[in-house]
Image (spheres, rainbow, N blue to C red):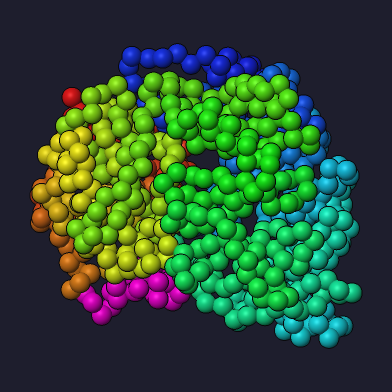
Amino acid sequence: MMRIATFLSAIAAACLLFASPALSQSPPPVDAYAANTAISSVDISPNGQRLAMLASVEGGERRAIVTGLDGSGATVLSLSDEVGIAPTGLNWLSDDYLIVDFAQRRRPPGGGPIRNIPRRYIMRADGGNSYEIPASSQVVRYMPEDPEHVLMLLPVVRDDRDSIMARRGAADGVSLALGLFRHNLARNSRNRLAVGESTTASILVDDDYDPVIRYDLDTRARRIEIFIQDGGWQSVYREDYEEERYGRGGRNRRIFTPAGTPSGLVGEGPAYYTSGYDADRNMTVGYQFNPVTGERTPLGIDTGGADFGGYLTDWRNGRVIGAVWDADVRTYHYFDEPWASLQAQLEGAFPGSRVAMVSWDQSGNNIIVSRRLGGSSGAYYLFNRSAGSVSLIGRMRPGIPDNWVGDVIPVEYQARDGLTIPAYVTLPPNRDLADLPLVVMPHGGPQSRDYYDFDEWAQLLASRGYVVIQPQFRGSEGFGRDFIFRGHGEWGRAMQNDLSDAIGYLAGQGIVDPDRVCIFGWSYGGYAALAGATLTPELYRCVVAGAPVADVTAMMEWAEDTNGSGTVDYWTEYVGDWRRERERMIAISPTDQVENVRAPIFLVHGTEDTIVPIEQAELMAEALERAGKTYEYLPVEDGPHVSVLMTPEQKQAFYTRLLDFLDRHNPAD
């Protein structure tokens, strides 16, 4: 572990690098993309005098640090007695204390694959005393006028054995519930303000910090119940809801109800801001909901056909001040001034960039701004409103000069059945945009999506001369519920056609050479890459499949055995009934269609993948070996399923092999 003095010296040197990136005639080295971001999660203290951030030196070990506004006086916040633990996020709670999230990568006590175990600490900004709190705790409200305290939701054991309320808890009257507490930061002590039931999901407070609304979610009964405070909790709304399984193995659930999870009070309540599914518009929308009357009031905003994303709040008073969503680009929509004008000014100052106000001090004069794209690999700035100045705090990826950041263009094209497919095209910098090689890069999920952002993989490939297209194929989320449903049952079929049709679209623009195309994906994207190799082999010169599903039937059986019967409904709807439709599963399984392969294949898979077992890559490698096909295989030792969780060393090894593979089979020059 790096000593603190050494780390601080390295941070000071890094700050000089942040301030003066040199333009380069040669593409950045691989390690510039594999490295951890130099800074992230930048947050300004309530008094506006200090910054907290996550920082790494030379792209490696990440630490939480506190500095002055000019980068001076850096203090490292560390847990010296812990092994394999790294910070993942932080926020100021007062001028003296921060809440810092960590992930500890280790095997569970009972054995099994390596996992990232979440940890949460409250830490002094001067590097002094720190203590752990439950990882599930939630900060409900900051208390600027009482900086020694914050309001927190914490798990509590509720004992109702001597009360009639025992009927609502566990069978023996003891249950795990959620409690609202006034937490003393220095003493790690707390006063209870309210306790909910075992089903309580959230509690809202008013401007006097009094609990006023309780939101209960009973996942067993599939019921929502809302209470208001009136001399005790009084039930004012109850509804049985629908749910939809989604995500990896169907383990996540999306709830459809007008009484969505509260995000903040409207005025003094009882109405609150929330979001939910609108059947008339077939998409997720934001609105105000009154639990007493059951009335929904629209926000009156147009998301351009995209699902509503969420709300923006002011930490100083907990008020909702705006909304955010992702259509082709991310939109930050503020309801009132000065926020709306400030956002417009910043977007005007950084055209083409994704710009966000991520933190501000108590006065509202000093604002931390993040910027990505528009000629930037990512940076943080300090915006001083009274001075009208914007100064650079630091660059996220100082090893990638601005002139090597590829432009990202949101596009739409028509699939062969007429469906409009959104996509992002990353263009190689410093190249003539004609007859270039192409990499089709489908995302994972598949009920997921890409965003207008600096994509590490796309930018790495673009820096080497490749056009990269990221199709938001049918089944992707964020574009309405019907768009998701269009992907059900379409693995290897219409979903795959959407990827194939992207090639014809770009070739028609004259940008790419349709005879110089490779496909690269991870997770579901890895399946899509192998499906491209086996179902449409004429389209691709090479294939890169990371953490892929290769044998659909074997994968579904593993998911059912591992995750239980709850996955059956999800996978049957999304993929098909592998128990009854064997021929159909064989028709879309790359291992069963391996004889069709023409292009060389590069397989990569983490040995500690708990989502798609590494046996899937091994099954594909064995099938390719038997068929006498050309392939390469890179097992990533201790590698996880989620690629962004790979270490810089793991990414460096993978990226080096990736670029070498592409250069041998589809060279850019």
The one nearer the camera, 96 or 332, is 332
Residue at 74%, 39% (x, y): give it.
92
Residue at 62%, 46% (x, y): give it.
334
Name the quadrant of the N terminus.
top right
Q: Quadrant of residue 633?
A: top left
Above or below residue 337? Residue 366 is: above
Above or below residue 75? Residue 453 is: below
Horizontal and vertical percent position of residue 369: 61, 32
Q: Quadrant of residue 69?
A: top right
Q: Is residue 527 left or right of residue 76?
A: left
Residue at 81%, 59% (x, y): give it.
206
Does the magenta segment cover residue 121?
no
Q: Is residue 180 left or right of residue 556?
A: right
Horizontal and vertical percent position of residue 126: 79, 29
Name the quadrant of the C terminus.
top left
The one nearer the camera, 33 or 426, is 426
Residue at 54%, 70% (x, y): give it.
255
Q: Which residues, given as a range, are shown in magenta?
A: 554-582
Horizontal and vertical percent position of residue 661: 22, 34
Which secondary structure is most common in the magenta stretch? helix
Q: How many marks?
A: 0
Horizontal and vertical percent position of residue 301: 55, 55
Q: Does any portion of residue 588 appear in the rendered image?
A: yes
Q: Is residue 512 left or right of residue 308?
A: left
The one nearer the camera, 550 or 437, is 437
The one nearer the camera, 126 or 539, is 539
Q: Does any portion of residue 248 appear in the rendered image?
A: no
Above or below residue 420? Residue 257 is: below
